[in-house]
Image (cartoon, grey):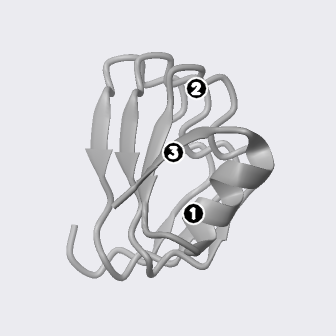
C-alpha cells in the first residue's frame, strides 16, 4: 500500500495462508509480532527504507527467507536473529 509507514503490532499474526510478501518502499517500522505464527511465510521482501524491526516480529515463521539489500537494517536483523536471507 502506498504511504504505508508502519506495520502494526500483530497485524498479520497467524495468517497461515501468507507465503510471499513484498513490502512497499517507504515502510519504516515492523512492530512486535506483526507476522508471528505465519507458518507458511517463505519469502518477504523488506525494502531498504525499513529502520526498525521488533525482535519478535517474525516469531514462529520457521520457513522465512528475508530478501533485502546488503547492509540494510533488514540484512543486519536477519544476521543477528539467524534468519535465512537473500541479498537483492
Mark 1 / mark 3, whichever is N-terminal: 1
* Crowd band around label 2 with a 10 angstrom C-alpha radius: few (<14), some (14–19), many (20+): some
Mark 3 / mark 2, whichever is N-terminal: 2
Q: Depth-wise, is mark 1 or mark 3 nearer the camera?
A: 3
Q: Depth-wise, is mark 2 or mark 1 nearer the camera?
A: 1
As drawn, the label of residue 85 is 3
How far is mark 3 from mark 2, CA to CA? 13 Å
Q: Is residue 40 left or right of residue 11?
A: left
Q: Secondary structure at mark 2?
A: loop
Q: Quadrant of residue 29?
A: bottom right
Q: Quadrant of residue 27?
A: bottom left
Query: Residue 10: image x %, image y %?
Result: 59, 43
Q: Which residue is mark 1?
A: 74
Residue at screen point 51% across, 45% down: 85
Query: Residue 61: image x %, image y %?
Result: 58, 26
Mark 2 / mark 1, whichever is N-terminal: 2
Q: Is residue 83 left or right of residue 24?
A: right
Q: Secondary structure at mark 3?
A: strand
Residue at screen point 28% across, 81% down: 3
Q: Which residue is mark 2?
A: 61
Q: Report if residue 30 is visible in the image.
A: no
Amino acid at each position: 500500500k502506498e504511504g504505508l509507514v508502519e506495520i502494526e503490532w500483530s497485524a498479520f499474526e497467524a495468517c497461515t495462508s501468507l507465503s510471499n510478501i513484498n513490502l512497499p518502499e517507504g515502510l519504516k517500522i515492523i512492530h512486535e509480532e506483526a507476522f508471528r505464527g505465519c507458518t507458511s511465510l517463505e519469502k518477504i521482501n523488506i525494502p531498504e527504507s525499513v529502520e526498525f524491526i521488533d525482535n519478535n516480529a517474525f516469531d514462529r515463521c520457521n520457513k522465512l527467507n528475508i530478501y533485502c539489500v546488503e547492509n540494510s537494517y533488514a540484512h543486519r536483523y536477519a544476521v543477528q536473529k539467524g534468519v535465512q536471507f537473500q541479498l537483492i
